[in-house]
Amino acid sequence: MTRVDTHLLLIVSDEAIRRFCLLTALGFNVEISAACTLRRFLCDRLQIEPDYLETRIQTVFLNFRAVDDPDAAMVTAGSTVGLSGPMPGIAGATLRRGSPLASMRGPISHVADGLRSPSQAGDVTVRLFNVIQQELGPCLLARGIRVTGEALQDLLCHRADLFGFALCSAQLDGKAISASALFAADWTGRTVCLQVSGPA
């Protein structure tokens, strides 16, 4: 399992929260104690409402293969899960869960192959795309997501002007940190539990 080296809590403007949602497309880690169905992982571990899963998340990838039945697909340590809303064109229609065109994506469709390691604990990588990134990202950031220090540093460096202006307060491992120290910090090699919320 990935070790969390540091905890970073940021209070920022609403606009900046949307920018931090970009990190969810790169992938963040979620710890699981044992293998479980994809539906259970999404609804229990990520706390996604069942109705939202059925109506808003139209395309689900498990290990880069499109999933039609989240009850038949198993998530294990080391898995990668991708979530997307509606995608345009024939590609979007083909990848959508339960699509009548699903037969056209045979080689990239997930096929249930049984549970191999029922007691294995570890990390699952989650990636959010398009509208799902903007809708689920703020809630997940408020609870805290685990990201690599390199991904965080890249985001901060490329948008320092925006974040510097939008930052209300910051705490690193429970202690206040200034904006200048935040942007000057070297996050390389760290795993960061990042919490981002808007002003009260």
Image (cartoon, rainbow, N blue to C red):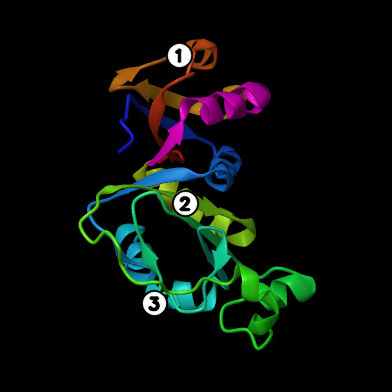
Q: Which residue is mark 2?
A: 126
Residues at circles 3 and 2 in contact by the CB criterion of under 8 Å: no
Q: Earlier in the sequence, mark 2 or mark 1?
A: 2
Which quarter of the figure is the N terminus placed in?
top left
Disc 1, disc 3: CB below 8 Å?
A: no
Measuring from the top left, give residue 14's x and y in whole percent. Answer: 55, 43
Nearer the viewer's eye, disc 3 or disc 2? 3
In front: mark 2 or mark 1? 2
Span of residues in magenta: 145-162
Q: Quadrant of residue 19?
A: top right
Say which residue appears at 64% left-offset and 57% top-offset.
Answer: 130
Q: CA distance from mark 3 to mark 2?
A: 18 Å
Question: Looking at numbered disc 1 in the image, what kind of residue is underneath it?
Answer: Ser
Check disc 3: other Cα within 10 Å, few if <14, some if 14-19, many if 20+.
some
**Would residue 105 be counted in the magenta stretch?**
no
Instruction: Look at the picture and state if 17 lies above or below 47.
Output: above
Q: Quadrant where the C terminus lies?
A: top left
Q: Is residue 151 magenta?
A: yes
- Residue identified by numbered label 3: 72
Report the disc number at residue 178.
1
Q: Nearer the viewer, residue 178 or 91?
A: 91
- Taking the view exactly as shown, the residue that stands out farthest to the left is 119
Closer to the chain start, of discs 1 and 3, is: 3
**Contact check, label 2 and label 1, Cβ < 8 Å:** no
Report, in whole angstroms, how far the alpha carbon at label 1 lies from the one at label 3: 48 Å
* Residue 72: quarter of image: bottom left
| Magenta residues, dominant SS class | helix
Classify 10 Å Cα crowding around label 1: few (below 14), some (14-19), many (20 and above): some
